[in-house]
Image (spheres, rainbow, N blue to C red):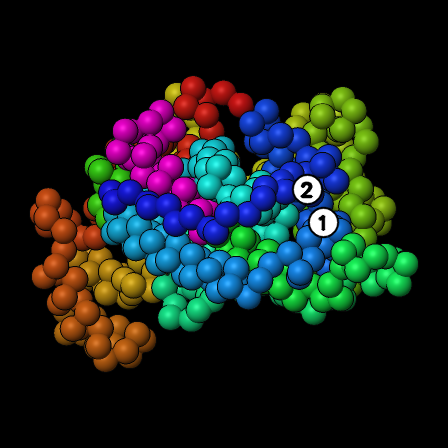
């Protein structure tokens, strides 16, 4: 992998940690997770204008010259071109599937590593404080949809880094609302200050310089995070072993399907009323779900109800297990749903519903289509009395489009080697037989030893 050359900014007196002291931010070297949590809390509770005002108490537009701004823009452009080149290089490894198959703790570790490296490479004018200007790289955002947030973020950043604009800035409405902010010193005894102490009445240049620092920080974070993932792949690090076993020993369609399916799983199980089965969004008025107090106190088990009326209606059923056994109706999407249930750590099987959902996801992925289903149906049904390949294809064309036979022929021609006479769906099923437990473990983030 090509190394990232460092493009230096023009020399500026270091002012960091200007904001870290103000907001009492934990040192990243002591506790990176706490450092990030502190910054996320500051950003969530502050406006960009408030952040910029804090900077302007020390900096103002007179601190910079027009030549400084030109030099900063030029340095950022060279830096972004370098970052884009390296991101394109590592993207050839198709790391998206690998990333999605990692469990949440491993994904978080790579993001934190990216943040640490970005701090080390931060422009001296703000240093670690650049983190305060970047709400889009919050861990919660990047890990949304089981990591899809990070994959969505990378192409947006890369598009900016590769653009021909000078300067090229990643858009963010939260930050941009501070772009035309009067300097907070305006109302602070302006006429009583000697000329040498008077502050500029504008923050336009300070905002521009901070925006440049913000974009350098984001670029460093993006590349450093990806390099961290590549390092683990190349060295088959402990947290990467199960993922690489799946990727290297499974059909490509299987790994794509598994990764795609994982992004559609909810981060948390649904809460449904045990009686009417509704979730909160399906109830017209906002309600706070109740839990059965007996099951909660005796079994540490939650059975939910949207109202006392529903609780009373369900009582004839629930009273048989109330306070005695952890029994629920296993409603769709809840903790008791069989689809969400984990496989036995000592067995090589997974719930049938889960296997079927993933195989169905494979069959209906936008880049595969109905030809996968067609191949399977033709193998199973073409020998039945009254059915033939032509009849089946005619019906499939009516349902899925006239190009189905052409797509099917392409699938049969380009089918990965080693499948023999198996259809694609049968091949995926065999992959489940070999790698079902590892796959499910990654879906549900079960530790390798099968413990909680």
- Which residue does the numbered mark 2 point to in the structure image? 18
Q: CA distance from mark 2 to mark 1?
A: 8 Å
Residue at numbered disc 1: 58
* SS type, badge 2: helix
Residue at the (76%, 59%) spot, across then down? 199
Q: Which image quadrant is residue 402 in?
A: bottom left
- In the image, residue 194 sits, relative to residue 105, either above or below, namely below
Q: Position of residue 386 (x, y in %)?
A: 17, 70
Q: Say which of 69 and 446 sits in front.
A: 69
In screen coordinates, is 389 left or right of 399? left
Q: Quadrant of the N terminus?
A: top left
Q: Which residues are magenta?
A: 218-244
Side of 310 where 266 appears, left or right: left
Does any portion of residue 149 appear in the rendered image? Answer: no
Task: Report if residue 228 lies within the magenta region.
Answer: yes
Prevalent SS, magenta region? helix
Residue 376, position in %: x, y? Answer: 22, 57
- Disc 2 and disc 1 in contact, CB within 8 angstroms: yes
């Amino acid at each position: 992998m090509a190394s990232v050359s460092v493009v230096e900014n023009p020399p500026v007196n270091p002012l960091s940690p200007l904001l870290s002291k103000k907001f009492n931010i934990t040192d990243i070297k002591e506790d990176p997770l706490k450092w990030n949590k502190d910054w996320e809390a500051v950003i969530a509770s502050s406006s960009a204008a408030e952040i910029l005002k804090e900077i302007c108490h020390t900096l103002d537009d007179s601190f910079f010259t027009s030549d400084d701004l030109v030099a900063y823009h030029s340095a950022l452009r060279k830096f972004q071109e370098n970052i884009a080149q390296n991101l394109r290089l590592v993207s050839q490894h198709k790391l998206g599937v690998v990333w999605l198959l990692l469990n949440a703790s491993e994904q978080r570790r790579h993001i934190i590593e990216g943040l640490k490296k970005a701090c080390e490479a931060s422009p001296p004018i703000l240093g670690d404080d650049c983190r305060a200007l970047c709400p889009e790289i919050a861990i919660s955002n990047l890990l949304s949809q089981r990591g899809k947030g990070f994959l969505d973020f990378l192409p947006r950043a890369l598009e900016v880094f590769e653009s021909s604009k000078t300067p090229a800035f990643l858009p963010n409405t939260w930050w941009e609302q501070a772009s035309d902010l009067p300097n907070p010193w305006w109302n602070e005894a302006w006429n009583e200050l000697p000329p040498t102490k008077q502050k500029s009445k504008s923050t336009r240049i300070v905002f521009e310089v901070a925006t440049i620092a913000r974009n350098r920080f984001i670029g460093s974070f993006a590349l450093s995070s990806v390099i961290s993932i590549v390092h683990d792949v190349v060295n088959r690090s402990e947290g990467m072993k199960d993922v690489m076993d799946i990727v290297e020993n499974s059909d490509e369609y299987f790994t794509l399907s598994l990764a795609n399916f994982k992004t559609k799983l909810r981060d948390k199980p649904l809460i449904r009323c045990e009686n009417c089965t509704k979730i909160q969004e399906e109830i017209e008025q906002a309600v706070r779900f109740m839990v059965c107090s007996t099951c909660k106190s005796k079994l540490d088990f939650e059975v939910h109800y949207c109202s006392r009326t529903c609780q009373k209606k369900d009582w004839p059923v629930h009273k048989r297990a109330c306070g005695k056994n952890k029994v629920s109706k296993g409603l769709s999407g809840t903790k008791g749903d069989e689809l969400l249930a984990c496989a036995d750590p000592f067995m090589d099987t997974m719930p049938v519903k889960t296997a079927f959902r993933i195989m169905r996801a494979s069959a209906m992925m936008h880049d595969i289509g109905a030809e996968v289903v067609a191949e399977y149906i033709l193998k199973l049904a073409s020998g039945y009395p009254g059915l033939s390949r032509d009849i089946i294809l005619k019906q499939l064309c009516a349902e899925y489009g006239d190009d189905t036979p052409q797509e099917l022929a392409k699938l049969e021609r380009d089918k990965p080697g080693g499948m023999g006479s198996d259809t694609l769906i049968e091949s995926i099923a065999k992959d489940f037989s070999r790698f079902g437990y590892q796959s499910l473990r990654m879906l549900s983030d079960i530790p390798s030893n099968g413990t909680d």
